[in-house]
Image (cartoon, coloured by chain):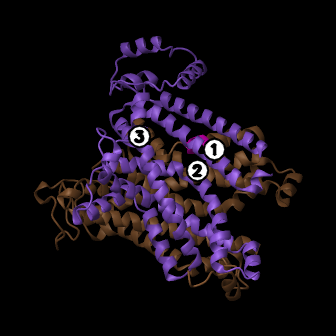
């Protein structure tokens, strides 16, 4: 167990280093390099030269990289000249709102996907299974913003239940529950589509295991077999699944935030991409990358904690 | 739940079809068996027909149905479906049926070329990493992990905001994110192939690493790669669609389904429903179709491997 955790931790650190290197490369891929990233693409040569000298950009790249990582470790993610605000403070405003969106949607998706997957596995290759599979295929194949638009048409225009716009940044989220419904619903449906096919095959795999046959031959009722034996085992991989799906869910959140004007990290990133506000884009990329690496590390650790086969090996 | 739990081992779709197909084509080769399994999978066949239909629709359609997709015609903008314009017109007066055909060309070409590029890159990277092993493998695969840690859309937005978008550039940008998954799959298969007898035998006879990769590893990962490349087309179509919505897709006047859909979505409050649904439905149909084909191919290749 300890060896596994240590190896996994070292791997995560290597990947984190990789994320910083990729972001550093992106920074230098920009036409004009970091100076233009900070000052904007229209900065003139004199401004760039002054900036380069001031921030040590004439030093060799490895030295610059170490300096830059050092800044990151001290929590300095850069400064947005466009918004006249530090990237840290921008992110600390927007990340919690994205966490709320992603957290609630993922939790709801799990609550739907697990029963749906069990039901599909039990009724496999029957009409009910085909209908559910069909729906998850369609949601999976639908551009997220198209799904969001359909929900706006259905639940805001045809049936005027919910406002078509997400919450605003000026008051706390819990005071704007109606505005949260459509963004959360959209992201939940996307996430269910990611999860449910996996859940179905996970239950199916467990139904053929020896322990099920043993329990059956001992005369254990089918209900008990399903809920006491199969379900806990089938749910185990969902921990890993959440870890693995995190990048996909965050990409989905970016689209959902753009559709509903939901003031989160994705919208911040999208606005930055349109205004060429590169410090914000770089800072967000780092934060998202770190979140994903930590998320998948946690998922693997949890999996090891829950699954004795890994704990004792 | 009253229907009871199927306690008997549920045979996978592939296994079921294998038994049936085996009886019918017992003398056939592995390839014919795979074809038989694929054609027995009705969803895969439906997928194949849908793709064939859209290829005809997009590439032959414009020959039969002439429309002007270059000059805007502001006199006839935002017209609903009529005999003259079966799917209506858009906000600058383009005929939407004609635009759907031309736009589909771009979307399909982007999807297919991205899949081809990403798959080749992924196969090369994965085969080299898996075959080299050790430190080289570690570094190469941690690079893949790190790129995978940054959500696709963030990377795509970043890259397309640095490089101003055009169709070829967009293909390169999407492919530069899409090759990661195949590289992982190929690397895993290469690791297990490396220890197999036939590879060791080839090495014993003095075959170099390149010969082993090209003659022994790549032919054996073909199944996995073919299945994945089908899914790649679907993902690339979705990626280029999302980028269009985010304003970093292929710039007008070139048409593509993603651009048409996101234009339509912008006018959702004006009630121009005919500007939303056709492109949206086409995208969903094509993506579902490629996913069905991928599933069918997976079953077919599984059977082939089982028969070996």
Q: Is residue B272 left or right of residue A104?
A: left
Which residue is rendered at x = 34% and y = 52% of the image?
A180
Residue receiving disc 3: A265
Mark 2 touches mark 1? (CB < 8 Å): yes
Residues B260 and B99: in front is: B260
- The spot of residue B207 in percent (x, y) is 83, 51
Q: Are marks 2 and 3 on the same chain?
A: yes
Residues B52 and B284: in front is: B284
- The spot of residue A192 in percent (x, y) is 48, 62
- The spot of residue A41 in percent (x, y) is 36, 26
Q: Is residue A162 left or right of residue B201?
A: left
Give the colour of chain B.
brown
Give the colour of chain A.
purple
Q: Secondary structure at mark 2?
A: helix
Q: Which mark is residue A243?
A: 2
Q: Which chain does the residue under circle 1 lie in?
A: A
């Amino acid at each position: 167990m300890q060896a596994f955790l240590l190896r996994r931790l070292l791997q995560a650190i290597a990947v984190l280093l990789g994320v910083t290197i990729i972001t550093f490369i992106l920074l230098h891929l920009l036409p004009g390099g970091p100076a233009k990233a900070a000052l904007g693409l229209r900065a003139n040569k004199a401004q760039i030269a002054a900036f380069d000298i001031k921030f040590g950009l004439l030093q060799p790249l490895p030295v610059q990289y170490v300096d830059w990582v050092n800044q990151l470790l001290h929590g300095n993610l850069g400064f947005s000249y466009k918004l006249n605000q530090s990237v840290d403070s921008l992110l600390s405003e927007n990340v919690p709102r994205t966490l709320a969106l992603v957290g609630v949607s993922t939790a709801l998706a799990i609550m739907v996907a697990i029963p749906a997957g069990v039901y599909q596995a039990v009724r496999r290759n029957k009409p009910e299974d085909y209908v559910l599979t069909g729906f998850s295929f369609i949601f999976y194949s639908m551009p997220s913003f198209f799904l969001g638009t359909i929900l706006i048409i259905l639940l805001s225009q045809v049936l005027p239940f919910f406002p078509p716009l997400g919450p605003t940044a000026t008051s706390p989220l819990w005071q704007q529950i109606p505005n949260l419904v459509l963004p959360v619903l959209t992201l939940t449906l996307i996430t269910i589509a990611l999860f449910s096919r996996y859940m179905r095959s996970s239950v199916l795999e467990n139904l053929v295991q020896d322990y099920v046959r043993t329990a059956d031959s001992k005369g254990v009722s089918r209900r008990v077999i399903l809920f006491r034996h199969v379900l806990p085992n089938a749910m185990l991989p969902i921990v890993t699944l959440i870890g693995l799906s995190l990048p996909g869910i965050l990409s989905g959140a970016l689209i959902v935030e753009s559709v509903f004007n939901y003031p989160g990290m994705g919208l911040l990133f999208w606005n930055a991409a349109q205004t060429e506000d590169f410090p914000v884009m770089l800072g967000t990329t780092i934060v998202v990358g770190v979140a994903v690496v930590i998320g998948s590390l946690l998922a693997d650790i949890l999996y090891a904690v829950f699954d004795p086969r890994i704990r004792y090996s | 739940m009253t229907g009871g739990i199927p306690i008997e081992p549920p045979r996978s779709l592939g296994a079921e079809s294998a038994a049936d197909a085996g009886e019918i084509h017992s003398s056939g080769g592995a390839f014919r068996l795979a074809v038989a399994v694929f054609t027995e999978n009705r969803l895969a066949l439906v997928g194949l027909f849908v793709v064939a239909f859209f290829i005809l629709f997009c590439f032959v359609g414009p020959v039969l149905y002439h429309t002007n997709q270059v000059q805007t015609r502001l006199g006839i903008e935002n017209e609903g479906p009529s005999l003259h314009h079966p799917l209506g017109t858009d906000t600058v007066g383009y005929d939407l049926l004609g635009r759907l055909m031309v736009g589909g060309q771009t979307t399909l070409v982007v999807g297919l070329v991205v899949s081809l590029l990403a798959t080749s890159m992924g196969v090369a990277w994965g085969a080299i990493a898996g075959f080299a092993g050790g430190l080289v493998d570690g570094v190469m695969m941690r690079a893949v992990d790190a790129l995978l840690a940054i959500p696709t859309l963030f990377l795509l937005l970043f890259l397309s905001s640095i490089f101003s978008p055009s169709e070829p550039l967009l293909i390169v940008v999407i492919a530069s994110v899409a090759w990661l998954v195949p590289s992982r799959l190929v690397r895993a298969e290469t690791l297990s192939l490396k220890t197999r007898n036939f590879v060791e035998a080839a090495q014993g006879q003095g075959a170099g690493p390149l010969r082993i990769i090209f003659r022994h590893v790549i032919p054996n990962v073909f199944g996995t790669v073919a299945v994945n490349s089908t899914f790649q087309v679907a993902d690339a179509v979705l990626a280029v669609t999302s980028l269009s919505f985010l304003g970093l897709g292929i710039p007008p006047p070139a048409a593509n389904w993603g651009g048409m859909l996101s234009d339509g979505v912008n006018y959702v409050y004006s009630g121009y429903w005919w500007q939303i649904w056709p492109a949206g439905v086409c995208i969903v149909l094509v993506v579902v179709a490629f996913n069905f084909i991928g599933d069918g191919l997976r079953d077919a290749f599984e059977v082939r491997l089982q028969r070996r």
